[in-house]
Image (tube, helix red, strand yellow):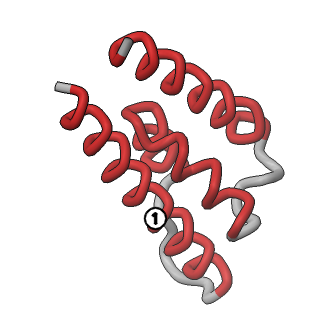
Amino acid sequence: MVLFLLTYYAVLSFLTFLLFGVDKWKARHHQWRIPETRLYLLSVLGGAAGAFIGMYLFRHKTQHAKFIWGIPFLLITHTVLLIYLIV
């Protein structure tokens, strides 16, 4: 169970991180973008760590309040939940 949860969060975080990078690339090249709701939904479902890293590494979505406050809140919530389930 623990291995499954850690793998789930790692894979979803990596996918979310990649999508933040892709969306930033698309923004720079004036292409069709990934909807904010999709990025945020992936963060809610477990990709908050990847979203947090992607936000600041790619400097993407750092001017949006729901990302500035929401992603760290989700990251803390997921971390507490994982610790609770593991211990």
Mark 1 Cα-neighbour bin, 10 Å: few <14, some 14–19, many ≥20: some
Residue 51 located left or right of residue 46: right
Expressed as whole percent of the image width and height from the top left, the position of residue 47 reads 44, 43
Is the residue 55 above or below the residue 75 in the image?
A: below
Expressed as whole percent of the image width and height from the top left, the position of residue 59 reads 76, 66
User: What residue is at 58 percent from the left and 81 percent from the top?
Assistant: 25
Residue 37 located left or right of residue 52: left
Q: Where is the C terminus found, in terms of image quarters? A: top left
Q: Where is the N terminus found, in terms of image quarters? A: top left
User: What residue is at 41 percent from the left and 59 percent from the top?
Assistant: 14
Expressed as whole percent of the image width and height from the top left, the position of residue 17 reads 50, 60
- Between 17 and 63, which is closer to the camera in this rendering? 17
Furthest residue in direction front, as rendered? 87
User: What residue is at 45 percent from the left and 31 percent from the top?
Assistant: 44
- Between 77 and 37, which is closer to the camera in this rendering? 77
- Between 65 and 17, which is closer to the camera in this rendering? 17
Expressed as whole percent of the image width and height from the top left, the position of residue 20 reads 54, 63
- Between 59 and 5, which is closer to the camera in this rendering? 5
Is the residue 7 above or below the residue 73 in the image?
A: below
Residue to which mark 1 is pinned: 19
In the rendered picture of this protein, how many numbered marks are placed on residues? 1
Residue 5 located left or right of residue 33: left
Element assignment for label 1 = helix
Is the residue 73 above or below the residue 87 in the image?
A: below
Circle 1: residue type: Leu
User: What residue is at 40 percent from the left and 36 percent from the top?
Assistant: 46
Furthest residue in direction bottom, as rendered? 29
